[in-house]
Amino acid sequence: MASEPTPKKPRRREDTFPGLGQVYRDVGPYLTLGIQLAAAVVFFFFIGWWLDTRMDTSPVFKLIGLFLGFVGGMIKFFRSAAEMSKKDKSL
């Protein structure tokens, strides 16, 4: 008499991708850097747009807002990246 094959146990995600949760925890803070940069540029652009509509100066404050948002966003980006790399090196 032939023995019946035993059904396989369903595999858990932790077995398939060991340490995937840790990877997300490690990479997560770096993913927010791009969002912070984009948010700064968009925020200052809309402040410039609002000032342009109030003062009837067409692209002046929009361009100033874009410039300030980009510069401020890049400063924040590099400071955050440097701080995160210091934390990684200390571990």
Image (tube, rainbow, N blue to C red):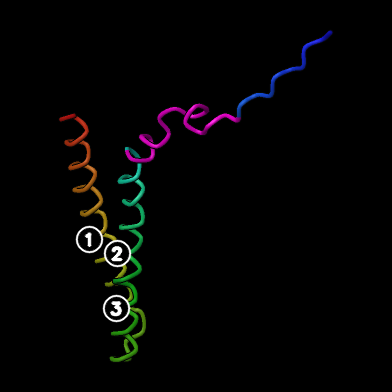
Distance from disc 3 to disc 2, alpha carbons, whole Å, reads: 11 Å
The quarter of the picture where the N terminus appears is: top right
Instruction: Find disc 1 in the rendering and name its residue.
Output: 72
Q: Position of residue 89 (x, y in %)?
A: 19, 29
Q: Position of residue 27 (x, y in %)?
A: 35, 40
* Neighbour tally class for label 2: few under 14, some 14-19, many 20 plus, Cα within 10 Å: many
* Residue positioned 31% across, 51% down in the render: 33
Circle number at residue 47: 3
Q: Is residue 56 part of the magenta span, yes or no?
A: no
Q: Viewer-proximal residue, 46 or 80?
A: 80
The quarter of the picture where the C terminus appears is: top left
Instruction: Find disc 2 in the rendering and name its residue.
Output: 40
Q: Amino acid at mark 2?
A: Ala
Q: Is tag 1's residue or tag 3's residue first in the polypeptide sequence? A: 3
List the single residue furthest toward the front. 1
* Residue positioned 38% across, 40% down in the render: 24
